[in-house]
Image (spheres, helix red, strand yellow):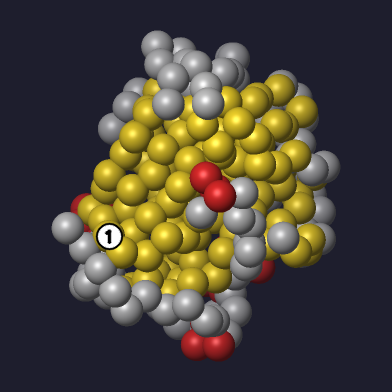
Amino acid sequence: MNNQPGLIHAASATTATLLAALMLPFATVAGADTGATHVIGNFSAGNLADWSEQVFKGHTVYQPATIDGRQALSAVSAASASGLHKKVKIDLAATPYLEWSWRTDDILRGIDETTRAGDDYPLRLYVIFSRGWFFWQTYALCYVWASNKPADAAWPNAYTSNTIQLAVQSGEARLGEWLDYRRDVRADIKRYMGFDVDHIDAVAIMTDTDNSAQRASAWYGDIIFSGN
C-alpha cells in the first residue's frame, strides 16, 4: 500500500481532494477488466497491492483483520479522514455489477450528512469516472452507510456536486452484522447522475470521522465487478 499526502490539507475537503488526486493518466493504469469477473479488493486474502492511501486529516487505520471468523480489511477512524484508492479501468458493458460486503459497529450521532460539518461516514465505497482530462470532469458515485439520511436517499456531496452520495444502508438497525450488496453501477450512474458511461477509472473506500470528531470501527469485505 502506498501513502500519498493530501493535495488539500484542509479540515475535510475529502471527496473533492480525492477526485483531484485521481485526475490521472488513466490510460497508463494496468489491470483493465477483460473477463466476466474482476476482483478489485481481495481483502479476504489480506491483499492491498495497488491500493494507495490518500490522507486528508490524520490517518484512518486500515489493516487486515479477522472478525466473526472472516478475514477482511479493518478501518478505525478517530477524528480522522484518510481513504484507500485503486486506479483500475472497468468495462461496465461487460461487468456492470459491483458486489461487496461490509460491517460497522458505529454510526455518527447528531450529524447532517448534507452539510460540510456532517460529511462523515463509517463506510464509503466510491466508483470514479472521468469525462475529460480536467479535474472538474472527474465524477464519483459514492455508496455509503448513512448515519441519519434514510436508505435509498441520494444527495450531492457537501464539498463537490461532481459526487453523489447514495445511502445503501442507514442507521443502527444492522450494526454489528455483515451485509452484502450487489449494484448495477452503470444503471445507478445513469439514474442518479444522468450520465451514460461505459467504464469507470478507479474505486476508493473511506471511513472518516474528522468533521464530527467521533470514532468509527468498520470492516470491508472483497470488492468484485461481475457480468451477471
Instruction: Quadrant for the N terminus, please.
Output: bottom right
Q: Residue at x 35, y 23 (%)?
A: 150
- Does any portion of residue 160 appear in the rendered image? no
- The residue that mark 1 highlights is 226
Count neighbours of disc 1 (C-alpha within 10 A) and say few if under 14, some if 14 to 19, many if 20 or more: some
The correct choice, above or below, for 89 with respect to 216 in the image is below
The correct choice, above or below, for 167 with respect to 106 in the image is below
SS label for mark 1: strand
Q: Position of residue 126 (x, y in %)?
A: 47, 53
Q: Residue at x 56, y 18 (%)?
A: 105
Q: Position of residue 176 (x, y in %)?
A: 50, 17
Instruction: Quadrant for the C terminus, please.
Output: bottom left
Residue 170: image quadrant is top left
Total label count?
A: 1
Residue placed most toward the observer, 120 or 43 = 43
What amino acid is at disc 1?
Ser
The correct choice, above or below, for 196 with respect to 69 in the image is below
Q: Position of residue 151 (x, y in %)?
A: 32, 27
Q: Residue at x 47, y 16 (%)?
A: 175
| Left or right, 175 with reference to 18 | left
| Left or right, 14 with reference to 9 | left
Residue placed most toward the observer, 153 or 142 = 142
Query: From this viewpoint, which residue is outermost toward the left?
Result: 228
Q: Residue at x 72, y 32 (%)?
A: 77
| Left or right, 38 with reference to 6 | left
